[in-house]
Amino acid sequence: MTAYSKMTREELQAAYAAEQKKFDDLKAQGLNLNMARGKPGKAQLDLVSDIFDIKLTAEDFTIDGFDARNYGELTGLPAARRLFAEILGCKPQQVFAGGNSSLQLMYDTVSKAYTHGMLHSARPWCKEEKIKWLCPAPGYDRHFKVTESFGFELITIAMTENGPDMDAVEEAIKDPAVKGMWNVPKYSNPQGITYSDETIRRLASMKPAAPDFLLMWDNAYCIHEFEGEFVPFVEILSECEKYGNADMVFEFASTSKVTLPGAGIACFACSEANLAYMTKLMDIQVISFDKVNQLRHVRFLKDKANTLELMKRHSAIMAPKFRAVTDALDAEIAPLEIASWNHPKGGYFVSVDAMPGTAKRALALCKEAGVTMTGAGATFPYGKDPADSNIRIAPSLPPVSELEQAIAVFCTCLKLAALEKLLG
């Protein structure tokens, strides 16, 4: 194959005609394939469905002196807090074990800062004239939508191979209106980047102008390797404490892609002072979360070692799917020099940077051919990618056979969009 940039106009026109024929043939198949969201596939859900086989007798419901069926223990069962603490590397007394959704806990944290302020706030954020928020991008669309929904001004921070551009972050936090920052520090969504130790140290040691600056640390993929062994990771709470910033960070995690996305358990971890403050506010809105489900997960997952063994079984399902995507891109797109992409070793996404100005067109063609993907621009604040380039691929849901069909469509659509651009 020859790079498109090295072709004559006549050669580009011939290539376009060939790809258009392929596209018409694919479209005629009437496909209905979905790579839009990072949902676990059926094989992964089957892998953990025996969690429902756990039998709990009347005696089993009592753990650490607490009856999981009853009211109380707002911060979660001590056993659930210990499990998350072991996985994250923090202390059980720093963990709040909640319901099934870490996103709900993230939203609630921002909401409470808005209505009541954070621990070191001079006033609730709703009383501030303007709130600004740092958004490393490409990033997670649902993060951006949370802060956008409160009317915050979203500031894009470019991602590098080591994490967010820290020079830009350190400059931005000189503004006291900048109240926080989103982070997916390990196998980031969508690029699969893991923050370097240096990046984490610089984040943990920051001295923002806003005393109530909030580092939102969504460690969604902390144990989600699909290539190689588990990679240990810097524990952010103790790192922040080391630099006098113990109250600056809230860390989030869940079992959504460990057990069951709709019926797992989630947590946040923070300083003990922050936990006491948040518990006081949350005590008004909820008596307790689903402790029976917390108990079920404690019985099923047992400890970190057992959980990591389960994740190896997940990886055996996930790895072939990611290889199907990257192998196709390497074979079909790389020689043409019309896009670049990551080769992640964990997480749930492959990030593709198409030729600038072609992402929307490529995804419109995919939709026309029966392949649903995350919308162009979704990985940037306000859903606006200034280069119209980044595309997030979620390979986890379809079986490999369907995935191969979907990625064949995607490659054809990337080529057509690039050829249209080059032919003007």
Image: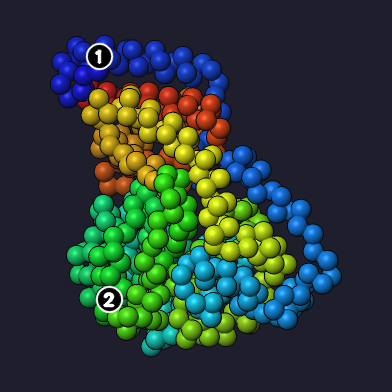
Q: Residue furthest bottom?
A: 122
SS assignment at label 2: loop
Measured as percent of width and height from the top left, residue 312 is found at: 52, 48
> Which residue occupies the foreground of this view, 358 or 88?
88
Residues at marks 1 and 2, CA–CA distance in whole angstroms? 55 Å
Q: Nearer the viewer, residue 420 or 71?
A: 71
Mark 2: few, some, or many residues within 10 Å (few <14, many ≥20)? some
Label 1: which residue?
13
Residue plotted at (51% across, 16% down): 28
Quadrant for the C terminus, please.
Answer: top left
> In x, y percent, where is residue 54?
75, 57
Quarter of image, res 216:
bottom left
Occupied quadrant, residue 214: bottom left
**Quarter assignment of residue 300:** bottom right
Q: Is residue 387 above or below residue 150?
A: above
Q: Which residue is mark 2?
A: 205
Tag 1: amino acid: Gln
Classify 162 as above or below 352: below
Q: Position of residue 14 (x, y in %)?
A: 26, 11
Q: Is residue 176 left or right of residue 60?
A: left
- Name the kind of residue labelled 2 in the image: Ser
Which numbered disc covers residue 381?
Answer: none
**In this rendering, does residue 116 appear at all?**
no
Residue for point 54% across, 45% down: 314
At a point 57% along the width and 68% down the height, the residue shown is: 83
Above or below, 375 against 95 in this view is above
Mark 1 or 2 closer to N-term?
Answer: 1
Give whichever of 311, 32 is nearer the camera.
311
Coordinates of residue 11 in the picture (x, y in percent): 21, 13
